[in-house]
Image: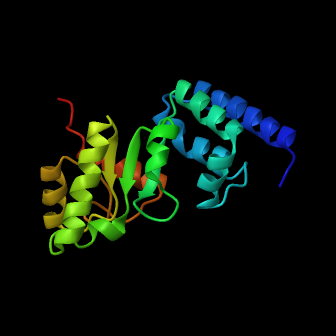
């Protein structure tokens, strides 16, 4: 484990870099890719280990709070699996939950998955959090999620993964044309 002062310097460097990225971007959303890369890769957080580090590190909490103040929106990915914990909903300044695809896959046919997803959405809403459902592949899944109050979706039902330029073109084609 690295000495505490090195971690603190890394956290300060991340905050400074995120501030520079945001200052040069048209909006926080436009800088999202760079911000995620700077936070996760530069701090050498591996998938999952990131949350273990958060449990142990006051510096990480300070960093997340400062990122929140900079306008960076934080989400708990793969909620309901692995390292995601209900405690994070209280401990960290998160703005949304991403429901793992393993729960979404069978919501139209499995009452247990449907109940779990409905409960996750209701809990998130009662806490004032947004909800993103991962792995939406069918109209039935989308209709269930909409009826349950989910407000964002991602998955093959909408599109295969795309490079940034192709995604921008897809969005441009779907926007109403100005007359």
The N terminus lies in which quarter of the figure? Answer: bottom right
107 up-or-down from 127: above or below: below
Residue at 27 percent across and 64 percent down: it is 136
The answer to whether 173 is drawn above or below residue 26 in the figure is below
User: Is residue 179 shown left or right of residue 123?
Assistant: left
Residue 172 in sight here: no
Q: Residue at x 68, y 37 (%)?
A: 58
Image position, residue 149 (x, y; %): 18, 46
Q: Is residue 78 left or right of residue 10?
A: left
- Asked whether residue 110 appears in the rendered view, the answer is yes
Nearest the eye: 74 or 84: 84
Q: Total marks drawn?
A: 0
Report x, y in % for residue 162: 42, 60
Asked which colour scheme the image uses, the reply is rainbow
Q: Position of residue 120 (x, y in %)?
A: 29, 53
Q: What is the quadrant of the C terminus in the image?
A: top left
Q: Nearer the viewer, residue 49 or 139?
A: 49
Relative horizontal placement of residue 31, taking residue 133 as reference (left or right) = right
Residue 32, x across and y down, in percent: 52, 41
Say whether residue 148 is left or right of residue 52.
left
Residue sitting at x 32%, y 47%: 131
- Residue 141, by quadrant, is bottom left
Depicted 81 relative to depicted 39: above or below: below
């Amino acid at each position: 484990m690295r000495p505490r002062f090195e971690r603190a310097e890394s956290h300060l460097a991340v905050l400074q870099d995120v501030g520079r990225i945001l200052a040069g971007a048209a909006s926080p959303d436009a800088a999202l890719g760079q911000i995620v890369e700077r936070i996760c890769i530069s701090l050498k957080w591996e998938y999952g280990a990131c949350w273990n580090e958060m449990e142990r590190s006051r510096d990480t909490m300070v960093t997340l709070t400062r990122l929140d103040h900079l306008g960076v929106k934080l989400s708990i990915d793969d909620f309901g699996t692995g390292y995601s914990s209900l405690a994070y909903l209280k401990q960290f300044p998160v703005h949304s939950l991403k429901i793992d695809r393993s729960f979404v896959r069978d919501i139209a046919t499995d009452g247990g998955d449907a109940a779990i997803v409905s409960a996750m959405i209701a809990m998130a809403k009662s806490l004032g959090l947004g909800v993103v459902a991962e792995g939406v592949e069918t109209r039935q899944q989308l209709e269930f999620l909409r009826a349950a109050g989910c407000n964002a979706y991602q998955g093959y039902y909408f599109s295969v993964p795309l490079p940034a330029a192709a995604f921008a073109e897809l969005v441009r084609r779907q926007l109403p044309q100005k007359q």
